[in-house]
Amino acid sequence: MYVAGFVIPVPEDKRETYRQWAVKSAKLFRELGCIEIVESWEDDVPDGKLTDFRRAVAAKAGEKIVLSWQIWPDRATVDAAEATMRDDDRFAVPDDIPFDGKRLIMGGFEPILAMGRD
C-alpha cells in the first residue's frame, strides 16, 4: 500500500464545484490503479499556536481546508500513473479548478501502520 496525501484550501462557496471536480478526477485515478480516494471537507479545524492546516496552505478568509488521500497498491503504480498523467490530456489542469493549486500541499507516504486493512 502507498498513500498520496493532500491539503488544499478551497473557497467555501466552491464546495459543490470541488466535489464534482473530485468525482471526475477519482474516476480517472481509478483507471490508473488507485484503490481508494477520500475527500474530506473541513468540519473541526482549530487554529494552532505554532502551526496548523490553515497556515500550512496560507488559507485566506472564506476558505475551507480539504484533507484528501489516495490509497494505491504501491509506489510503482503511483509512478506509472504520474507518467501516464503527463501525456494524457484528460489530466490537464483546467483554468477553472476550484482552488489555488499553488497552495496545495502534497506528498507520498509509505505506511508504517494501517488499522482495519488487510
Image (tube, helix red, strand yellow):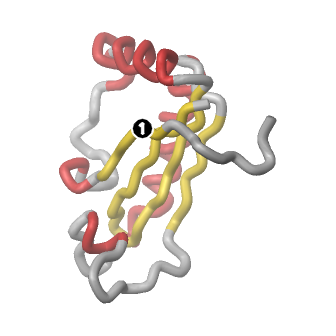
**Residue 57, placed above or below residue 46:** above
Q: Is residue 56 left or right of residue 25?
A: left
Quadrant in the picture for the N terminus: top right
Q: Residue at x 51, y 17 (%)?
A: 77
Q: x, y (%) of residue 111?
A: 57, 41
Q: How many marks?
A: 1
| Closer to the camera in the image, 56 or 20 | 56
What is the quadrant of residue 61 in the picture? bottom left
At a point 48% along the width and 34% down the height, the residue shown is 25
Which quarter of the picture shows residue 17?
A: bottom left
For the C terminus, give its image quadrant.
top right
Residue drawn at x 29%, y 52% is: 104
- Residue 47: x, y in percent? 37, 85
Q: Is residue 111 above or below residue 90?
A: below
Instruction: Report x, y in % for residue 96.
Output: 27, 45
* Secondary-structure class at tag 1: strand
Amino acid type assigned to the residue bearing label 1 in the image: Gly
Is 33 in front, or is 52?
Answer: 52
Packing grade of label 1 (10 A; few <14, some 14-19, many >=20) is some
In the rendered image of this protein, does residue 25 appear above or below residue 44? above
Q: Which residue is mark 1?
A: 108
**In the image, is 54 to the left or to the right of 28?**
left
Residue at (50% x, 71% y) in the render? 42
Q: Is residue 65 above or below residue 97?
A: below
